[in-house]
Image (tube, rainbow, N blue to C red):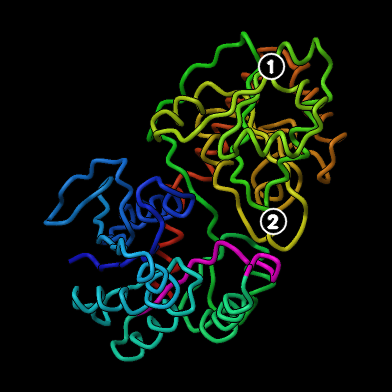
Amino acid sequence: MKKRIFVFGGYSSFPRGSAKANYMQYLGQALKEAEYDVYIISNINDEFRLQIQEGHLSYKGLKIIPYKITNIRLLRRLQFDYLQGHIFVNLLKKYRVTKEDIVLVYSGDLGVNREVIKYKRKIGFKSVHVVAEWVTSSYFEKKQKEKRYKTYLDRFLLQHDLIFPISSYIETHLIGDKSKSMCLPIMADTLEYPVGEKAFNKIKFIFPGNGLMKDAIEVVLKSFSQLTVQERERVELNLCGIKEEKIKNLLSPQEYDRLKDMLIVHKWMHYEELIELYQSMHFLMLAREENQMTLANFPSKVPEVMCYGVIPIVSRVGDYTKYYLEDNVNSLIFDGCDIDLCLEKIRQALSMTQAEIVDLSLKARECAKNKFDYRNWAGKIHNALEHM
């Protein structure tokens, strides 16, 4: 009988409803490849029609245990802030978790980690924890939430048997030698969709910003606004996850006027539509300041779009530029988060021949296949789990 592993994501809108959902999918697929019986615990993304497998909802062979959210507003907030851990442990009890099972937690919620650690001591199962972010005080609007986060870091994070930090920065500076760990970046599935074909009537860039502080949207927009008229005529700049009103607020009227003819702002898209967009793009734009949050994070869009041969143009920060991307080989990398440096790389992209773009595109896809595909990580993950 296969060993069961319960992967908790909480409010992640699985499948495909968030970066967390994507991480859980590829991790789940790697675990399945390693012969585990995988259960994903999350609220459901209604965009997808799920299959039934052994009495469970299922997506790509991963069984799903729905993590339901109440529609009552006040109770919903209470549930989200204080009751996640109790709800999760009750689900584990329902599935009669034993010491032979593994419980994997992808949540920085204090209550979730506290209740799992408490239940682990009673039952004797092994617990694993994914740490995908390390945020600072400025991230929190309320002191109470900051206090709960610090309590989770100080008292419960290191009580898990194994930690999967998403970056070497988290592994080195937050975990150190205080716990068993294995650095595990966001993975990918390079066989899930075809690469697609790219037209060259325009050079197409995409900025999949999420509007959070990690992405320097202003640097990217202002860089494109400084292109010449002739350069702008050759460019199509696609923006996702940011409203046009915010774009106007970040730019002067003159800058926006120079951008508007090459700008395409996409509203919410079905996932299949998003894939079609990625397949048609030549370059990904991502500029980030260097700070604790960006050093700790690993942007999921980098390997995701590289599956479709999209070439990253990125600022040098974090593991993806340290260990995976190579300037002028499978990406274009600039040092710092500066308009002039970003503009220089955009102009380099525009100066490339079609053959040069195709060459970098093929190598970006090759990098995704060789370094990020979950199939290459299954053995390493299995080894880490069996030796915790």
Q: Which residue is mark 1?
A: 261
Span of residues in magenta:
126-141
Location of residue 201 in the rendering, given as x and y in whole percent from the top left corner: 62, 8
- Image vertical order of residue 266 relative to residue 88, above or below: above
- Image vertical order of residue 74 relative to residue 38, above or below: below
Quarter of the image for the C terminus: give it.
bottom left
Viewer can see residue 175: no
- Image vertical order of residue 97 relative to residue 346, above or below: below
Taking the view exactly as shown, the residue that stands out farthest to the right is 340
- Residue at x 80% of width, y 10% of height: 230
Category of crowding for the residue at label 2, using alpha-carbon neighbours closer than 10 angstroms: few (below 14), some (14–19), many (at least 20)? many
In the rendered structure, does residue 127 fall within the stretch colored magenta?
yes
Q: Please state which amino acid type lies under the numbered disc 1.
A: Asp
In the rendered structure, does residue 338 fall within the stretch colored magenta?
no
- Residue at x 28% of width, y 45% of height: 60
Please tell me which residue lies in front, 173 or 79. Answer: 79
Q: Nearer the viewer, mark 2 or mark 1?
A: 1
Please tell me which residue lies in front, 343 or 84. Answer: 84
Quarter of the image for the N terminus: give it.
bottom left
* Lateral position of residue 114 relative to residue 125, left or right: right
